[in-house]
Image (spheres, coloured by chain):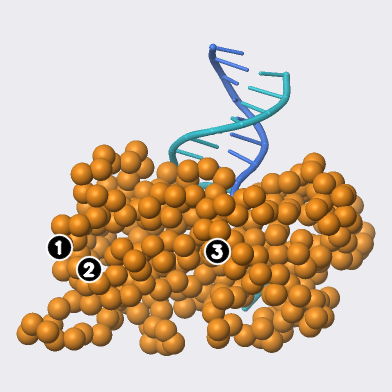
Chain colours: A orange, B cyan, C blue
Amino acid sequence: VPELPEVEVVRRGLEGHVVGRTIAVVEVCHPRAVRRHVAGEADFVARLVGAELPTVHRRGKYLWLPLVVPGPRAGDAQEADEALVGHLGMSGQLLVCEPGVADHTHLRVRIGFTDGGPELRFVDQRTFGGLFVEPLVPGDPPVPRSLTHIARDVLDPLFDDAAFHAALRVRRTGLKSALLDQSLISGVGNIYADEALWRAKLHYARPTGTLRRPDTDRLLAAVREVMTAALALGGTSFDSLYVNVNGQSGYFDRSLRAYGRAGQPCERCGTTIRREPFANRSSYFCPRCQRSASARYVTATRPGEIH
DNA sequence: ACGGGCCCCTGTTGGC
DNA sequence: TGCCAACAGGGGCCCG
């Protein structure tokens, strides 16, 4: 459930079903799912068992739940100094389901609670995602250590539009590469990058150094609009891999204007949407609406035609 | 230091 | 029908 809207849907689900509860048991079913927990599987489990989960945070595509361990005397309030961190990768799901429900084929981690209620299950077909426990680094809010290089996302009120524009100006790369760079702006993946670029009428290969402030403002507005609209529809789901904590799909796939629409007419101008290879994936765009890559740059990116 | 390329996995799909 | 290459929403690491 990869991009920001889908991860936010999951965060809200965790807020409703997991926050306030205390972990009783943890079962790691596949070691690769906890590979980012360097101290190992047993340490991962030990740090979780007995911890209470007061809140759930998200930055970009990462989720984390601060862990509060009960103090020596009952009722002692403790500050969380570490957190359970999760990334869904390409195919990860966090599902809330009754303890009796049959294990999913790709169940990787099971977390049970002291109240005996629904479990939290991490299910991940491709195992690009994972869970790990890490110390929190002080900040607003405190962030797990390995997330300190992740930029704030566009729905974060503290995202700095001017700083983002300045960063684009000094980069020497294409616009979509910059959008996908989680250290510049987080939460944007392949789908919403293409959708935002279509909305802002910008070419994916436009050199970032050529952007003027109004271009950046239009782009950021488009990213915010498309993500907000997707969130309202529960995110984008093409199949059962991308679901909320209750296993339900979102409906934003019907609202996509560029992604996956190769060969179909642009809804703005009727020109056929084109698909081009991009970084081992694909870029979808309207060749008429999104013509802003300079001719020199486009030429230079074609193998064997560098002038 | 920074950008692009490659790899980590499993499953589905479409062409021959 | 079968086989196999291409492709899939991500990111970390290595290399130049």
Q: Secondary structure at mark 1?
A: loop
Residue at (25%, 72%) from the top-left corner? A20
Instruction: Name the residue tied to disc 1.
Output: A114
Spatial CA distance of label 1 from label 3 is 32 Å
Measured Cα–Cα span from mark 2 to mark 3: 26 Å
Q: Mark 2: which amino acid?
A: Arg
**Viewer-closest of A197 and A84:** A197
Q: Which residue is mark 2?
A: A21
Helix, strand or loop for disc 3:
helix
Dot 3 corresponds to which residue?
A: A231
Of all chains, the one bearing label 2 is A
Image height of A297 relative to A153, above or below? above
Q: Nearer the viewer, mark 2 or mark 3?
A: 3
The image shows residue A158, relative to residue A120, as above or below, that is: below
Q: Residue at x 80, y 69 (%)?
A: A207
Q: Position of residue A19 (x, y in %)?
A: 29, 70
The image position of residue A261, as x and y in percent, is 73, 46
The reply to whether dot 2 and dot 1 touch (C-beta < 8 Å) is yes
